[in-house]
Amino acid sequence: MKFFTKIIVLLCLLLGNCVSAEPFKVVVLPVDLFSVCDNYYCFPEVSEIIAEDVINNFNKCGKIVSPNIYDIRKKFEGDSKLKASAVNTLTRFKNKNSIDFTSAKVIADAFGAKSLLLINSLVTQPNSRRSVWEVMEVSSVFEAYSSYTMETYAVLTDNVNDVVMWSGKYKRRLADNESRFWALTSAQALSQLEKLKFYSRDIISKNISENVVLRFYPKVTEPILPQSIEKTETTDFRPNPLQGTNFKPQENKEYEEIDSEMIFDF
């Protein structure tokens, strides 16, 4: 009898721990969420491809939950004010690489989340900002030889304290060995799409997902100090995200241009 009692108590403790370990909720928003299919190939924008892969990674790992793109769009379409906040947030991030925390907080609250992950992917040239498929159309028409570079920005926000928890910048060269990036046939266009899907699924989305998970579940290790250096009372301050800090956000609650901490070349 005592043996079975111990088993029941142990199971209760284990179940209690599982229930208390509630996953964080993050809303992933690609900047092209509201864009209409306006490219010749009618391919999804790269920011949306990456966002969907990141959402799948979050929901598979079990530590972070994220609504899918379909449900996000459906919620915005059913609330005009919420959609206006989303358009403002995404447009500002896409064009100025900055965040309006006032609008971002409205979105996070609507989904019962405390964080947003914004994703933008574009091809930059002097005085030009284009999507990947626009570049392909231009290259295909004029048969231009150019070494295009696609830049992807990912920013994780803490909408409780109005701060950026993490930001990353990634680069990929869009060209073959002869510096060409075009699609003269539908088969070549589909081949380019599959290359970008592979890049998203197996490389960039995994890197983004892992970095975000580490912001909520950091791996803490004690540093090994050389014997010649004495350990002082000063410690490295690392605020616990979303648990409240003494940070006081600026009155306008706007985050200026983001300094990315990482560049990935592929």
Image (cartoon, helix red, strand yellow):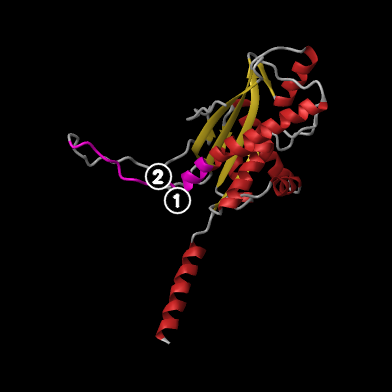
Mark 2: amino acid: Pro
Looking at the image, is 208 positioned above or below residue 260?
A: below
Going 40% across and 85% down the picture, which residue do you hit? 2
Mark 1: amino acid: Gln
Residue under label 2, please give it.
Answer: 239
| Quadrant where the N terminus is found in the figure | bottom left
Q: Residue 32's x, y, as percent?
A: 70, 34
| Residue 207 can be seen in this image | yes
Observer-nearest of 113 and 51: 51
Q: Are marks 2 and 1 in contact (CB under 8 Å)?
A: yes
Res. 232 image quadrant? top left
| Quadrant where the C terminus is found in the figure | top right
**Which disc number belongs to residue 97?**
none
Q: Residue 235's x, y, as percent?
A: 29, 41
Residues shaded magenta: 210-227
Residue 222 magenta-highlighted: yes
Q: Residue furthest front?
A: 177
Q: Main secondary structure of the magenta part?
A: loop
Going 49% across and 63% down the picture, which residue do you hit? 20
Q: Residue 214's x, y, as percent?
A: 47, 44
- Give the mark count: 2
Q: Viewed as shown, does residue 5 lie left or right of 87?
A: left
Looking at the image, is 125 positioned above or below residue 107?
A: above
Residue under label 1, please give it.
Answer: 243
Res. 90 image quadrant? top right
| Residue 65 can be seen in this image | no
